[in-house]
Amino acid sequence: MESRKSGYFVVYRDVWKHKVFKNLIQSSIWLYMISSASHQDKTLKFLDSPIFVKRTELIFPLRKNSTIWGISYSEMRTLILRLKRRGMISTRLHHLSPSHNHPSRKITIISVINYDKFQYIDDTQPPTAHLSPHTNKQTTNKQILNSVIKKSSKEGYEKIGEEGHYDMLRKGSKKYLKHKWKDEPIKPY
């Protein structure tokens, strides 16, 4: 078994069938992005230039990665645009120092939007509190879960977990599934 120093991330099993991805290569690229995103702010070297990346970001040169993954540049660009439209990633360009043969060099930095969802399991406490990218306040998964439970407890249901696109709810001793964004009736689990 490999060393555990590199950490772990959590991914839904249905990532291979998700409708945003056209094939398994695109699903694999998404998993690569999640696993390669920085877990803390740091400065990395790329082509002898220092690049500061924040937590959730990774250096992702589109042309180089399209070659690595064996897809065309236009297909890679289309995938990136689709992920941006879906709110899964955001991008920014970083300008590298010019060299004698490249007067203007740009590199794409990708930020995984819901990175914290993939880093910790809901029922466990993260090793340390982390900063939420939206509020810049320290929050923990337990605090987030408690706020979700308060909202669903108004209806008499208690959220006990997630499964794919569904929230797992409990009312008394019975368990139910409720779709996260579609207005569907609650189903027994």
Image: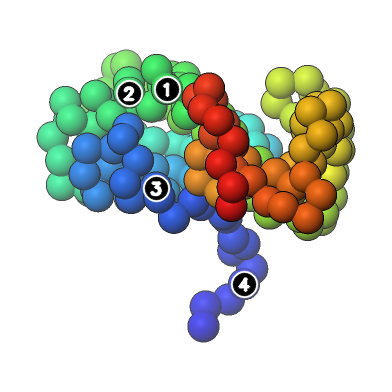
Q: Nearer the viewer, residue 178 or 105?
A: 178
Relative to 77, is 152 on the left or the right? Answer: right
Give the residue at mark 4. 4
Q: Nearer the viewer, residue 147 or 47?
A: 147
The answer for how far apart the CA atoms under marks 2 and 1 are is 6 Å
Of the two numbered discs 3 and 4 on the same chain, state the one appearing first in sequence.
4
Relative to 58, is 151 on the left or the right? Answer: right
For the view shown, which residue lies furthest in the bottom direction? 1
Task: Estimate the x, y position of residue 134 in percent, counting from the top left.
Answer: 71, 21
Q: Determine the secondary structure under disc 4.
A: helix
| Amino acid type, callout 3 | Val
Give the residue at mark 3. 15
What residue is rendered at 56% in x and 41% in y? 187
Characterize the local packing of mark 1: few (<14), some (14-19) or many (20 or more) Cα atoms within 10 angstroms.
few
Disc nearest the viewer among 2 and 4? 2
Task: Estimate the x, y position of residue 143 in percent, counting from the top left.
Answer: 86, 38
The answer for how far apart the CA atoms under marks 2 and 4 are is 33 Å
Characterize the local packing of mark 2: few (<14), some (14-19) or many (20 or more) Cα atoms within 10 angstroms.
some
Q: Is residue 187 above or below residue 1?
A: above
Q: Quadrant of residue 95?
A: top left
Residues at circles 2 and 1 in contact by the CB criterion of under 8 Å: yes
What residue is rendered at 51% in x and 83% in y? 1
Of the two numbered discs 1 and 3 on the same chain, state the one appearing first in sequence.
3
Q: Is residue 144 above or below residue 29?
A: above
Give the residue at mark 1. 86
Relative to 160, is 63 on the left or the right? Answer: left
Task: Estimate the x, y position of residue 76 in percent, counting from the top left.
Answer: 24, 32
Task: Estimate the x, y position of residue 100 in percent, counting from the top left.
Answer: 28, 25
Residues at circles 3 and 2 in contact by the CB criterion of under 8 Å: no
Give the residue at mark 2. 82
Residue 20 visible, this orientation: yes
Q: Determine the secondary structure under disc 1.
A: loop
